[in-house]
Image (cartoon, rainbow, N blue to C red):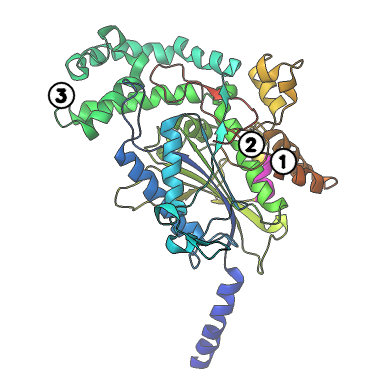
Amino acid sequence: MMLFTLLAASFLPLADFVSAERVLGAYVFQRHGDRTAKAFPPTQLTDLGYAEEYLTGSFFNKRYILSGSEYHIEGISSSVVNLAQITASAPQDHVIQNSGQAFLQGLYPAVGSAANETLRNGSTIYSPFSGYQLIPMSDVHTSTCNKAEVSSNDYYYSSSYQQLLSSTSKLYQSLTPNVNGAISSSQLSFKNAYTIWDLLHVATIHNSSANLPSNQIMQELLVLANNHEFNLAYNSSEPIRAVTGMTLAGEVLAALNQTITSGGKSKMSIQFGAYATFLSYFGLAGLSTNANFAGMPDYASSMVWELVTNATGTGIPSQLEISVRFLFHNGTSIAGSTQLQSYPLFGQSAVEIPWMQFVNSTNKFAITSQQQWCQACGNTTGICDSSSDASTSASSTGSSTAGMSLAVAGVIGAMVTLGVLAGLTALIILAFNLRLVRKSTLAAISRGSEASIVPLPAKATSA
């Protein structure tokens, strides 16, 4: 018996090696950090928000960048950033863009004297800010999706909205002394549920002299704001309402596919955005039945899609040996205790889904091309004007940093689905010459919504 035990034990390292998981790439969608109230524009990223994003970036450095980490992305530079391996993007919103910069500072921190440069004449150039690493962010262009706007407006005529508008009237009017004139009495209703809750929520963090409602009432206001914003972001009978989630899904698909088709040259994409896109994707991916996805994610929340394999060796294995794992963390901690929890997508029971199944399930609702976006939204002007030169431009969206145009991403996604390999190399080369995939935020019909416009595929520009 002892001999058997010893023999079995001797094979454990080999078994562990064979089953060792390899992380091939990752896509991160990151919410901005703590900010000032939306009721007092322009909103500003607070020092707390800056710290939240920096700490979250540091967490992802430890998870994906540092060599020796259990989840180290295979082949990614572990100290000095390789800009060919990573892409980042953010919409034209200074809260979100500044959050992105803070996150990237944590993801690839300053490298000190390693960044110093010796010139031919022997003189040394000392790098500013202790070797601060510059990671560019692609600019995100957005526009109104006509059908999504109409769909969101439909919510205000629904019986569920009308019922809550009526039943909560007294609650919202009772908040008059708490808002202290920042919101007029005529606006104190469920129609502005998010703006009202946001004003008071920011005060709970930053205003020590604020006249705040009880904790019970604050919780009621949060539940109502969650209900309001989720219904603006997603409706199962009107999928176009979740156009931001659809666009994000296409971008994630394109970015992960690029990791595969480039042989692992593209390794990590980060998109910075607002809560409405989270809510849209939650609904589309079948996550909203879970209580963890029933409301708005906190500041600095993260959605992550990891490309993983148990195949031995190095490099990109067969697509049949690759899986996708979805992870989510609701907010972060100033103490740096960020954790990611994996969840099954599309109503599945397993948290890891085979790559081809992920492609097929995502393509059921993903928007993967500019033309598809225009058709789905019913837009015929601007970039969707068939007579305009803009209509032939390469597209990109802000919710992701897939490193290729949304149009090219759609072609590649279709090729993956159909198994058509002819011409793939040419498409990849074309993709590398383009900017990042873009995504934006969902149309916010409510005045308090964080996202006032929805994604429009357009050529990305450098930030």
Boundaries of the magenta span:
355-360
Q: Is residue 168 above or below residue 11?
A: above
Circle 3 is placed at which residue position? 211
In front: 114, or 242?
Answer: 114
Q: Quadrant of residue 316?
A: bottom right
- Look at label 1 and name its amino acid: Gly
Direction from residue 95 to residue 369 in the image, left or right:
right
Q: Position of residue 183 (x, y in %)?
A: 27, 14
Q: Residue extending furthest front?
A: 121
Q: Residues within 10 Å of mark 1 (few under 14, many from 20)?
A: many
Which residue is found at the position 57% from the left and 64% from the top? Answer: 21
Q: What is the spatial separation of the Cα atoms under label 3 and label 1, in whole angstroms?
A: 53 Å
Element type where label 1 sits in the image = helix
Q: Residue extending furthest right?
A: 422
Magenta-span inclusion, residue 88:
no
| Circles 2 and 1 in contact, beta carbons < 8 Å | yes
